Image (cartoon, helix red, strand yellow):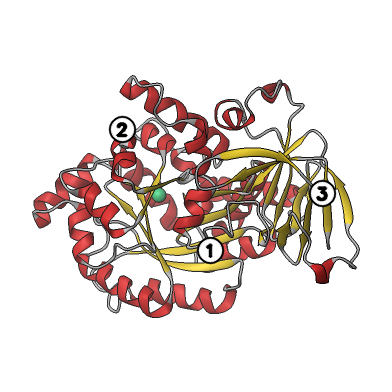
């Protein structure tokens, strides 16, 4: 289907700034255009009236665990180690494969509803998250959490999972990444092997890094180095790597990450909720590292709503550093658009609205009281929007949600199946 979108305010970006421009957009073959290419001009276009709408690029959530929606608000207000090892992991061990699918479908519902069109997922159920992305129309980067000493020894079955699901599901829209879980669950050797495999296969990489004090202390005890230093020596850090958390940065850690050209995915709600503190944003900015936003899973957030995450990002750092100039709204909006697009190697193609970019678009109702009047719409995206203002969402040129109606998800069925699984396994 081709669309001609008229009357909307468009969120545009260039190197230096974000700005709003009123113009007509054309969507064809999964791409968006301001000026339609000559060869397309004779085709027919359905007109979409976007009066009173802001159209922004689809939001990108660069770190989550989609299946975890099943454990939303299940293990709250407990310390990190107890949360992970005593509450979450035992449930994960008894969940059946289909839980990965239905949990990811519920995650897709929430992401679409709140304007997210791309997510990077670390999962534990082969093919289930990929299937959900494939069916719902979301853009996805999917990695199985790799653990163990040796990728070709005790880590082999999980690595094979990745290759099998890659073979079954990889497309332009659903891609696979290599994702060692963390330095406390995967050895330096496994990180080195994953880096080599990623290079050989042209895959992106991700991992959890320096999330808690315990992680850093145990790593110093075991290796005499910080997690960043250990992982750097394995060759895992380069511009194709995104690193979730990076809350506990010591010594040369940030200089190492910036020097490698890796991207940081900060997760303010999850870090706050698990009592891990607040990432050092001021030092991130000074180091010049690419900063992106993620929600982490719903067992530690407890939502996948990037508007809430942007609000927290904009407020928490100002409070902690007693500096209102930190985390300005425009920078925060970039953390869910142009920043993660760069981390994915899709600068100028994703996270932007310009000729030939991917047609991942979010329509926001500017008449909602939370956004009215529009004195500074970009600022309002960070400080005022709560996600409920999203009225339509398009990914890859197709509506996944149109005028508040899902087009690819049987929401009643998803709720029913999730309810059944929770009753049986939690
Ligand atoms: Ni995580």
How far apart are the two marked residues, 3 and 2, measured between alpha carbons? 43 Å
The reply to whether discs 1 and 2 touch (Cβ–Cβ < 8 Å) is no
Q: Which of 40 and 146 is in front in this view?
A: 40
**Could you classify mark 1 by the number of other residues whose Cα lies within 10 Å: few (under 14), some (14-19), or many (20 or more)?**
few
**Label 2 beta carbon within 8 A of ligand 1:** no
Q: Which mark is residue 5?
A: 3
Against 275, is 206 above or below?
Answer: below
Of badges 3 and 2, the one in the foreground is 3
Q: Which mark is residue 277?
A: 2
The reply to whether discs 1 and 3 touch (Cβ–Cβ < 8 Å) is no
| First reached walking from the N terminus: tag 3 or tag 2 | 3
Against 210, is 343 above or below?
Answer: below
Q: Position of residue 310 (x, y in %)?
A: 51, 35
User: Does residue 64 show up?
Assistant: no
Q: What element carries label 2?
A: loop
How far apart are the two marked residues, 1 and 2, measured between alpha carbons? 33 Å
| First reached walking from the N terminus: tag 1 or tag 2 | 1
Q: Is residue 263 left or right of residue 377?
A: left
Q: Which of 122 and 90 is in front in this view?
A: 122
**Which residue: 11% across, 55% down?**
222
Q: Where is residue 272 in the image (x, y as percent from the top left)?
A: 37, 32
Against 47, is 309 above or below?
Answer: above
**Which residue: 73% across, 57% down?**
33
How far apart are the two marked residues, 1 and 3, measured between alpha carbons? 41 Å
């Amino acid at each position: 289907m081709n669309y001609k979108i008229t009357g909307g305010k468009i969120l545009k970006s260039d190197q230096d700034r974000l700005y709003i421009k009123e113009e007509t957009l054309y969507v064809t073959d999964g791409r968006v255009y301001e000026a339609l290419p000559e060869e397309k001009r004779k085709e027919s276009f359905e007109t979409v009236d976007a009066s009173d709408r802001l159209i922004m690029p689809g939001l990108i959530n660069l770190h989550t665990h989609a299946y975890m929606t099943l454990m939303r608000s299940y293990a709250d207000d407990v310390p990190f180690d107890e949360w992970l090892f005593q509450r979450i992991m035992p449930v994960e061990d008894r969940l059946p494969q289909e839980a990965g699918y239905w949990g990811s479908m519920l995650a897709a519902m929430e992401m679409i509803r709140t304007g997210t069109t791309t997510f990077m997922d670390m999962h534990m159920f082969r093919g289930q998250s990929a299937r959900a992305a494939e069916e719902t129309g979301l853009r996805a980067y999917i990695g199985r959490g790799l653990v163990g000493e040796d990728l070709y020894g005790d880590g082999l079955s999980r690595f094979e999972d990745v290759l099998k699901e890659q073979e079954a599901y990889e497309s332009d829209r659903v891609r696979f990444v290599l994702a060692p879980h963390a330095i406390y669950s995967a050895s330096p050797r496994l990180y080195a092997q994953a880096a080599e495999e990623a290079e050989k296969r042209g895959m992106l990489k991700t991992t959890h890094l320096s999330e808690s004090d315990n992680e850093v202390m145990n790593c110093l005890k075991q290796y005499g180095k910080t997690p960043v230093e250990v992982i750097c020596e394995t060759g895992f850090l380069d511009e194709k790597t995104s690193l979730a958390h990076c809350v506990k940065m010591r010594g040369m850690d940030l200089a190492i990450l910036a020097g490698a050209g890796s991207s940081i995915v900060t997760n303010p709600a999850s870090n706050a909720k698990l009592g891990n503190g607040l990432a050092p944003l001021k030092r991130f900015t000074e180091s010049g590292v690419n900063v992106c936003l993620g929600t982490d899973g719903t067992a530690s957030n407890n939502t996948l709503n990037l508007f809430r995450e942007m609000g927290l990002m904009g407020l928490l750092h100002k409070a902690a550093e007693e500096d209102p100039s930190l985390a300005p709204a425009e920078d925060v909006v970039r953390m869910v658009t142009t920043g993660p697009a760069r981390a994915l190697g899709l600068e100028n193609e994703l996270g932007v609205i310009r000729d030939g970019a991917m047609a991942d678009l979010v329509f926001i109702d500017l008449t909602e009281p939370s956004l009215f009047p529009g004195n500074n719409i970009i600022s309002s995206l960070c400080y005022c929007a709560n996600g409920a203002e999203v009225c339509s969402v398009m990914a890859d040129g197709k509506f996944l949600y149109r005028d508040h109606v899902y087009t690819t998800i049987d929401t009643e069925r998803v709720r029913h199946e999730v309810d059944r699984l929770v009753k049986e396994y939690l």
